[in-house]
Image: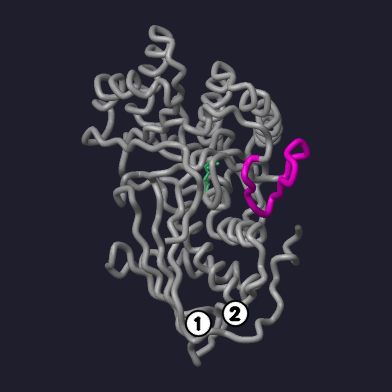
Amino acid sequence: MTEADFVPDRPEDLPDSGSSKWRAPSNIALVKYWGKKKGQIPTNPSVSFTLDNSATLTELRFKRTDKVTGLPAFEVFLQGQPAPYFAPKIRSFFERILPYQPFIAQYHFEIHTENTFPHSSGIASSASGMAALALCLMDMEKSLFPSMDEDFFYQKASFLARLGSGSAARSIRGKLVHWGKQDSVPGSSDLYGIPYPLKVAPLFGSFQDTILLVDKGEKQVSSTQGHGLMKDHPFAISRFTQARSNIDALQPILQEGDLTSFIALVESEALTLHAMMMTSMPYFMLMKAGTLQIIERIWEYRRSNGEPVCFTLDAGANVHLLYPKASQVSVHTFVERELLPFCQGGEHLRDRVGNGAERC
Ligand code: PMV
């Protein structure tokens, strides 16, 4: 598929009004995306677990308008309240998707959105938010072109979501999603995410993720700035090569359920992501003291207890604790006793691998 395949024909008929609602999950990358080219094309492929409980619910209400200005008019509401601070991000999303959904220019949209995780929990809602909105827009497109098949529907939803926020391309399907062209991954593309097409041991399908909220504040450096700093980064080329080789190394690990190698690869990816931040110019650091304390406790717990738990990190201070379902009882006790003191207000979220977005 190329970009041109996502440009639709001229629809015969446009509805006057309608609505659509989707719930799209957040995701956590195992092999990280950090660095992009024009049009949100990733500089290396990535793989993520789709989450289950952390999600955005978005309802898109649309009405045809006579005042066509080139871009759709819209209003955004978060938890029922006007949320004009989201407008710039959504406007630029509409600008980017316009060549692929030109009909949107004829509409006025009301976007009603809410997150299942607390607002300002330090969990980025851009992946789940953009994915939910893209899916609503695909419902609209499907009503114009009813013969559209399901594969195309989801591919294009991921394609559109990517234009809103790169990692949103991975928030459409479950349980593991691959995004980015890689020869060893059949069907892979830089343009959209695909359900991981290779064999995966069942234990990964029920993996758990406890998200430890170390810092709920705004990040000092946005993902967009961080991706930008990879352009002249001294280690960029080696990092992109390493990510590609980790994507390949993950294949037998996932297939065989090799937890020891899984842990080593996932933790190394997380620390490499943050190492890239610390070695860019200007350099920055998103981990906090609590992040490091938690990592040390996890290592100590694993050494003394043998439980196959590991951590990963997003572009922030929060820690994702990943473990198989079989370890749930002992890991929960460990979290309560040893990790919650490092979380802001003791806050944490219990999540697990999920099946992808759902129409509501
Ligand atoms: O989707 P963005 O532009 O917010 O980038 C997010 C990148 C990381 O979360 C740090 C890594 C990833 O692959 O999700």
Task: Please state the horizontal and vertical placement of residue 9, each as a whole percent of the image.
Answer: 71, 77
Color theme of the render: one colour
Closest to the observer: 199 or 116? 199
Q: Main secondary structure of the magenta part?
A: loop
The residue drawn where x is 32% and y is 34% is 214
Of the residues shown, which amino acid type is indicated by label 1?
A: Tyr
Of the residues shown, which amino acid type is indicated by label 2?
A: Phe
The residue drawn where x is 28% and y is 67% is 80
Residue 38 is left or right of residue 316, and the answer is: right
Task: Please state the horizontal and vertical placement of residue 291, each as a whole percent of the image.
Answer: 37, 28
Q: Is residue 279 magenta?
A: no
Residue 234 is left or right of residue 319, and the answer is: right
Closest to the observer: 160 or 216? 160
Residue underneath mark 2: 103
Classify the position of the N terminus by image quarter. bottom right
Which residue is most to the right?
183
Task: Please state the horizontal and vertical placement of residue 3, each as a whole percent of the image.
Answer: 72, 63
Residue underneath mark 1: 107
The residue drawn where x is 50% and y is 47% is 223
Element under label 1?
Answer: strand
- Mark 2 packing: few (<14 Cα in 10 Å), some, or many (20+)? many
Position of 66 relative to 160 (above/below):
below
- Which range of residues does the magenta coloring cover? 181-196
Classify the position of the C terminus by image quarter. bottom left
Dot 1 and dot 2 residues touching (CB under 8 Å): yes
Closest to the observer: 243 or 136? 136
Position of 240 relative to 143 (above/below):
above
Question: For the residues marked 1 and 2, what is the alpha-carbon distance in whole angstroms?
Answer: 8 Å
